[in-house]
Amino acid sequence: MLKNSVVVVLVGLLSFVAIHGWVQSVFGPTPAELDAARRAHFSQPSPNAVRAVHLFRNLSAQERQGIRNYLEESFVPLNEWLAELDLSVFQVLCLGEDHRPATREFLADQFFSAVHVDVLMLEATTDELRVINEALIEGKADVPLLEADIAAVINSARTRNRDVVVAAIEEISQQREERQRGQNIGFRDDTITRNFWRNFRAGQRHAVLFGALHCADRPAWMFEQILRTASREVASQTRGIRIVGAYQDRTIADLLYFLDEIGFSRRNFVIARPQAIHPKLA
């Protein structure tokens, strides 16, 4: 289940989708955190979602039961998935986020409390990390990084592993100036990737918390560069995780509507065998 293949995890209104080591996490924040306009936009299902439910209801009883059986067999509870992830062999988890408070709360409360990591790399410069560390020493409960609290995430990782190393790998101004003066200007992610390798500790577990696109398996972005420059062993032990709010994505909102309408009520689960998806759901 934890190989570099497609894996989908739903957590109530949380959903993780992994393709070739890529995991997408979609979650529903509390009502107080939801953007009213966005929620209103997704409050009604799309015609495709309504049509999918209609097609399901027009299947034979045997076919409907086959789909329900598939869901029951393939959707693994989140706690089990996290426990298996923690027991698995990995060296790099790239956590692509959108810098929202609810994202950080999820990471602190559910992810880092369950998964042991040795190195936590942040989208912060060395100066920014110094300020963060000073605030943590002072005992501040809310320490912003990119407009969302990072204190709970660091504290959760440290509770799981008191010796966790927190590293800053964002491009600093001197690196940007040097890169732009060069004959080949290059990209910010080129510098970030070099900073990643400078802080990489072979054989240890690294969680890299960055903006979503940096963790996408797309040419020139950090995650793709890590995979391309890593040894075969490290690359095989690298996964990308995308975290996005449920009400930010029409496809996820429609999926949740479909599952609710057909009576699949399991709250926290992982789609463990998406390659073997039921033909009626393809």
Image (cartoon, rainbow, N blue to C red):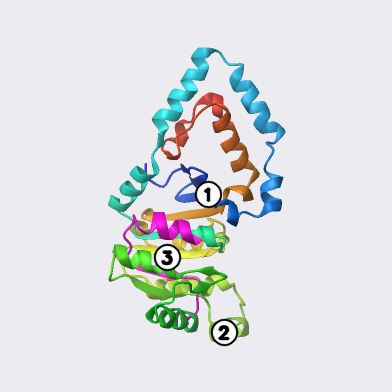
Q: Which residue is mark 1?
A: 27
Q: Is 109 within the magenta?
A: yes
Mark 1 and mark 2: Cα distance apart in space: 34 Å
Of badges 1 and 2, the one in the foreground is: 1
State the extent of the magenta-drawn residues as a range.
104-126
Characterize the local packing of mark 2: few (<14), some (14-19) or many (20 or more) Cα atoms within 10 angstroms: few
Could you tell me if the residues under marks 1 and 2 are in contact, i.e. CB atoms within 8 Å?
no
Q: Is 125 within the magenta?
A: yes
Kind of residue at disc 2: Ser
| Residue 142 visible in the snapshot | yes
Quarter of the image where one finds residue 137:
bottom left
User: Which quadrant: the C terminus?
Assistant: top right
Kind of residue at disc 1: Phe
Mark 1 and mark 3: Cα distance apart in space: 17 Å
Name the one closer to the observer, 82 or 181: 82
| Residue 235 visible in the snapshot | no
Name the one closer to the observer, 32 or 218: 32
Name the one closer to the observer, 217 or 49: 49
User: Which quadrant: the N terminus?
Assistant: top left
Examine the rendered structure and indicate whether residue 130 appears above or below residue 28.
below
Kindly state the secondary structure of the residue where label 3 is placed.
Answer: helix
Characterize the local packing of mark 1: few (<14), some (14-19) or many (20 or more) Cα atoms within 10 angstroms: many
Examine the rendered structure and indicate whether residue 64 appears above or below residue 273.
above
Indicate the position of residue 233 as horizontal and vertical percent values: 33, 57
Q: Residue drawn at (61%, 16%), measured in percent from left and top?
A: 58
Q: Is residue 78 left or right of residue 50?
A: left
Of badges 3 and 2, the one in the foreground is: 3
Indicate the position of residue 96 as horizontal and vertical percent values: 51, 59
Q: Which residue is mark 3?
A: 153
Indicate the position of residue 156 as horizontal and vertical percent values: 37, 64
Q: Residue drawn at (67%, 41%), measured in percent from left and top?
A: 43
Q: Which residue is mark 2?
A: 173
